[in-house]
Amino acid sequence: MSASASSTASKPNILIIYASDTALPATDEVRRGIRSVLRTIESGAPEVYEEYLDVTRFTGPDHLENMASFVEAKYSGRTVDVVVAVGHTALDFAVQRRAKLFPTATVVFSVVRAERIREASIPPHTFGIVSELDPVKTLELALRLQPEARNLVVITDASTLGKSWEAITRRKFAPFESRLELTFLAGLPLETVLERVSRIPRNSIILFLSMFEDGTGRKFVPRDVAGQIASAANAPTYSVYDTFLGQGVVGGYMDTFEAVGRASGTLVRQALSGEPLEGPLVREAETHKYIVDGRQMERWELDAADLPPGAEVRFREPSVWDQHRGQVLTGLAVVAFQFIFITALLIERRHRHSIERRLRESEEQYRNVVETQSELICRYLPDTTLTFVNDAYCRYFNRSRTELVGAKWLDLIPEAARAAALHQVKSLIVRPRAESYEHEVLRADGTVGWQHWTDRVILDANGGIVEIQAVGRDLTDLKHAEAEALRHRQELAHLTRVSVVGALSGALAHELNQPLTAILSNAQAAGRLISRVPVDVAEIELILKDIVEDDKRAGGVIQHLRSLLKKDTPDRSRVQVNDLIEVALRICRSDLILRSVPVSKRLAADLPEIEADPVQLQQVLLNLIKNACEAMNGKPAKDRLLLIISERTDGFVRVSFTDSGEGIPAKEINEFYQPFFTTKPLGLGLGLPICKWILEAHGGHLSGSNNPGGGATFSIELPIREEARHERSIADSVSG
């Protein structure tokens, strides 16, 4: 059904709903892009209305309900043909209230991340443009321009968007920790952030993502803050928002908001035309690319030659040549004509010899440089046939250059790894660029090793692929070291798990003693009943049933202890977090009674299963329960309470442990996760760091904070099954 079919007697009505307010530059750019397309509709030009939810300043369901009532009253009596939702909250608002507010409207959405759409089902007559804001590609751009960088500072704020950005970057930047020292300035006062960035080393990278609200609660327009940070910083600043360009940031991997708006307007125009929308319901913006500020490149002495192919340079300062091209050309033309006329024959003769000499020298210099490198250097055709290899390449594979040139390097890696490597090459051919990747390799001694390669596509003048040049290095020792480090971490986790069980040994002995004592008493009672005449069979059957139940209870305790004490290789399976919480509480039951700690549970009934190692996750739960109990040792028994909450939030399962203790000392809150830091007289300081490592290995996160009314809350987050591969979606104000 076309959108225009519902409004044939009058102009079609378009309602644009923005999640944010008019002060955000991104909102203004999207609006400009949409309206630039709608202005081109000549026949049956639509009536356009706009509403702003302003969710960055007004939060909560009550605000949205009030807005819904306002929209219903305002547009009563008007048929809305197309609703344009800008931002995820606007999309939810339109879809959830569609039946009541605009039952016949087509919904077109934009400025929504692809991950949010994958998590939700798209209702009929809903089409949209999804955006990509990739902090990893922005960091890779920074590392290309600053290969000497050793520090990364990530700046986020106290808003929902800022907290989402912090969680995403902590997870996505973990692979860079071997190269960069990561610092997160999250939720701090703006003055503190400005002071910190002014003192960072020059060999640093700053990634500014969000500042709607600082740690003092003050509200800001993030683009204005970007200018302050870039001005105060002692190192280049990058971002993922094109609205920050021109404020002092160098650049990043960005979507252009105005172009996203134009793409949305095109969908609206097509919906109004009555023609069916072709292609997928959800489309990628296809406007994302690397964009940099030429003035900031010059300010920080960054080389434009290091930019990725296809990068856009804005605000390039005009050269003297650009400013006075006409006058210079005129003068040069007069002089050149006379000069060329006099010296043409001499230049032609010498030119030929000079070019030949320059080419010979360049080729010799290039070969000398390449052959003296310790890295493996090669060039190859798109079918992986080698056209050149340096001496280091020959030494690595223990073959001569004659044997290697003309062969396919694909044959030098294990068969199981060839499909992925070939896919990488095909990707480079489809979209020529420089790309880094790793793969296994067959070493000269017959063993399997690892190599890291950076491939760059070489193009001719017409854009055709000539060949691919690659620079590689051996990673085998590093991979072995990583595996050894992982083994040591697993052993340390096992020892810590054993120490937790040891700390509970007295309570566990009591937990076992109860069913064993009951078994003995019931067995003695059964013996006495058997000696009586007549024998009370029914009573004996009840006693035997009690003996079986007590035996199962004792056996369950022993089975759980055995799984915790066993030293097995981590084995992940589909588990239900609520079940693991109940098991942990049964193990700690006697200890909780002895410590006079009551437990209150609010466990969500609809939690999905997650992929996890149940033993490792049980270790985390036991450790956090034990820590919460110890935090309340100094409190009177009547004031002690442990609250455990499980819930689903944005693609993750979250479990929170809230105690009523003294809380975390402010000066120690940032050191709690450091190995060997402890506030306990006999503690090793390994419990929380190991819990953090276990959760991060599962794609999750551990956090702790003080409660406003006293005590502390530690929370764990674990990705829901397949959703572990996707980043958590950012709050729908995907803007700057």
Image (spheres, rainbow, N blue to C red):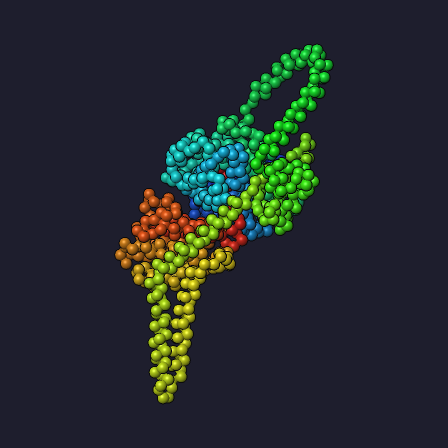
Above or below 730: residue 220: above
Position of 621 compared to 336: left or right? left
Quadrant in the picture for residue 671: top left
Above or below 497: residue 290: above
Indicate the position of residue 666 as horizontal and vertical percent values.
Answer: 33, 44
**Residue at 42%, 53% in the rendered image:** 492
Indicate the position of residue 121 as horizontal and vertical percent values.
Answer: 56, 52
Indicate the position of residue 348 as horizontal and vertical percent values.
Answer: 72, 17
Is any atom of residue 268 visible in this view? no
**Residue at 43%, 54% in the rendered image:** 493
- Residue at the outermost left position: 636
Q: How many marks?
A: 0
Above or below 496: residue 227: above
User: 76 or 261: nearer the eye?
Assistant: 261
Indicate the position of residue 263 as horizontal and vertical percent values.
Answer: 60, 39
User: 10 or 186: nearer the eye?
Assistant: 186
**Residue at 36%, 64% in the rendered image:** 508
**Residue at 68%, 12% in the rendered image:** 339
Is any atom of residue 275 visible in this view? yes
Quadrant in the picture for residue 151: top left
- Residue at the outermost bottom position: 533
